[in-house]
Amino acid sequence: MRTRTTVAAVSGALALSALVMPAAQAGTDGSAGVGRPSVAEQHGVAVPGAVSGASRSASVGAQAAPTVSNVRINAGKSVVVGSQSAKTFTVSLTASHPSGIKSLYIDLWHGADPDAADGWLPPAEGVTCAVVSSTTAADCKMTITARPGLNDPNGKGDLYANILAGTWHVGVGVWANDDSEYVNDFYKTHRVQRNAVLTMNASPEPVRKGSTLSLKGAFTRANWETGTYSKFTNQYLQLQFKKAGSTAYSKVKTAKSNSYGAISTSNTAVYDGTWRFYFSGASTTTSPLTVSPGDYVDVR
């Protein structure tokens, strides 16, 4: 089974520590779950050099829960994962408390019930923080790695099924030196998506002015279950054109991928310029956009 790192901690000099917990392997229907501990269950690490909860509470008194802000996943962009390569991204937050911050945690999980998640992306070991004051750890960063593929006895494949593409929940936990805590399995949501690839070919090249230009392409997206790219069918796209000398593309017409993922349309050739297909994105696939490489056509 894969070993998961479940807690990263900070103390005065931002010392690091981690609690290691194994994750259960899930079936593709998600019924077995992935063994994700709740955010509250992550708190269990004694940080070397940290002031104990009892003595700290005696000196400053129990305080309200830590304040958490600026929670960001992958700099606010969707986490887009291909068919085989792992994707490592940064998660960050700002935390403050009168007694100081002892430990923190961020993860992503998929499903309706945090105790029966069918997908889980925990943080790697280590956290770095910029300390603003003795009470605030600002811009604390950790990394999470998402690996596509089917689960096997070695636990490989966080994204073991295509149904995991879409909206994930973000869990956040922060613990202060006086043992007060902020824990939330539903802090916010974030998208984890399948990468998509568009191609474009215009012909003939060059083309006589006023003649019909044929514009063809293929639309595929990452299949996490097979480790390949599969046809992306029945999707509406834009055919776009950028006239020679211009810096911007404009919409010409709408095209649609067929049951094989192929795209085929045509247009009258009038000006020299570059043609491309544009897809505005879907909840499960490459957001906010996917574009094909541009194909420049000389009109004579």
Image (tube, rainbow, N blue to C red):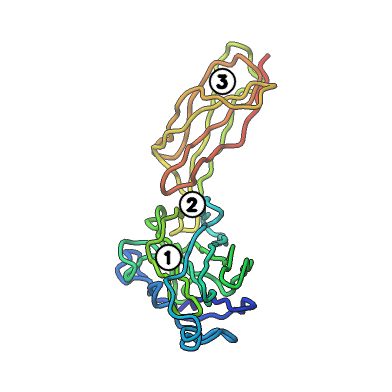
Label 3 SS? strand
Q: Which amino acid does label 1 sit on?
A: Gly
* Nearest-to-viewer mark from 2 and 3: 2
Circles 2 and 1, Cβ within 8 Å, touching? The answer is no
Residue, disc 3: 213
Q: Are marks 2 and 3 in contact (CB under 8 Å)?
A: no
The residue sitting at 57% across, 37% down in the picture is 292
Q: For residue 16, which quarter of the picture?
A: bottom right
In the rendered image, residue 146, in percent from the top left (x then y), is placed at 51, 63
Whole-percent x, y for residue 69 in the image: 49, 60
Q: Which amino acid does label 2 sit on?
A: Ala
Q: Badge 1 is on which residue?
A: 171
> What numbered label is drawn on residue 74?
none
Q: Residues within 10 Å of mark 1 (few under 14, many from 20)?
A: many
In the image, what residue occupies the spot 54% across and 63% down?
Answer: 94
Q: Residue at x 59, y 64 (%)?
A: 138
Q: What residue type is labelled 3?
A: Leu
- Asked which secondary structure carries label 1, the reply is strand
Residue wearing tag 2? 222
Assign the N terminus to one quadrant of the image: bottom left
221 sits to left or right of 10: left
| Label 3: how many Cα within 10 Å (few below 14, some 14–19, many 20+) | many
Q: In this view of the protein, which residue sits in the foreground, 41 or 298?
A: 41
Q: Is mark 2 on a helix, strand or loop?
A: strand
Tag 3 or tag 1, which sits nearer the N-term? 1
Q: How far separated are the C-alphas under marks 1 and 3?
A: 51 Å
Q: In the rendered view of the protein, which quadrant contains the C terminus? A: top right
